[in-house]
Image (spheres, rainbow, N blue to C red):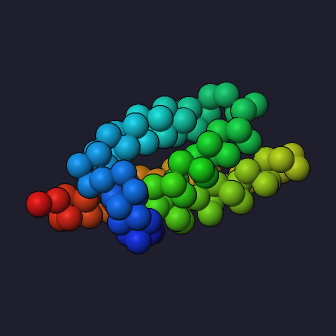
């Protein structure tokens, strides 16, 4: 679920010591949107929320989540009601666990 090559690219680009700042920012911003999705709030902005989640996910290597958000964004754009919100949330939750565990293992 996590593209570890992308994480290594980020570490090379910004430095391994600064990755924790990026992770903290990612988790703070994404958690806010995920909570809105969990609660069913602001469904009028679902397309924009999924676009944001897609970009954030792909930037930090959450490839499966990014793909689901892309699919959901496209469905929302054409007015389809079957946006895979529960699947996106489930994939985020499991990806986050894998991601944080992987970062802990990679830390010196």
Is 7 drawn above or below residue 17 in the view shown? below
Q: Which residue is drawn at 72% across and 32% down?
A: 45
The residue positioned farthest toward the right in the image shown? 78
Is 39 drawn above or below residue 6 in the view shown? above
Q: In which quarter of the image is residue 106?
A: bottom left
Nearest to the observer: residue 6 or residue 76: 6
Q: Which residue is drawn at 32% across and 40% down?
A: 21
Question: In the image, is 76 to the left or to the right of 22?
Answer: right
Is 33 drawn above or below residue 6 in the view shown? above
Q: Which residue is drawn at 62% across and 42% down?
A: 52
Quadrant where the image shows the C terminus: bottom left
Q: Could you tell me residue 81's position as x and y percent?
A: 79, 48
The residue positioned farthest toward the top in the image shown? 42
Nearest to the observer: residue 20 or residue 50: 20
Question: In the image, is 75 to the left or to the right of 9?
Answer: right
Q: Which residue is drawn at 38% across and 69% down?
A: 4
Question: In the image, is 108 to the left or to the right of 37?
Answer: left
Is 44 drawn above or below residue 3 in the view shown? above
Q: Could you tell me residue 91's position as x and y percent?
A: 48, 59
Residue 7 visible here: no
Quadrant where the image shows the N terminus: bottom left
Q: Could you tell me residue 41's position as x and y percent?
A: 62, 28
Q: Could you tell me residue 50's position as x and y percent?
A: 65, 45
Residue 11 visible here: yes
């Amino acid at each position: 679920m996590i593209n570890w090559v992308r994480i290594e690219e980020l570490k090379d680009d910004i430095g391994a010591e600064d990755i924790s700042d990026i992770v903290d920012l990612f988790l703070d911003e994404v958690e806010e949107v995920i909570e809105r999705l969990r609660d069913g709030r602001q469904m009028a902005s679902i397309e924009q929320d999924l676009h944001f989640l897609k970009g954030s996910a792909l930037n930090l290597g959450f490839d499966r989540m990014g793909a689901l958000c892309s699919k959901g964004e496209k469905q929302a754009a054409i007015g389809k009601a079957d946006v895979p919100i529960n699947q996106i949330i489930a994939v985020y939750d499991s990806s986050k666990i894998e991601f944080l565990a992987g970062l802990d293992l990679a830390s010196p």
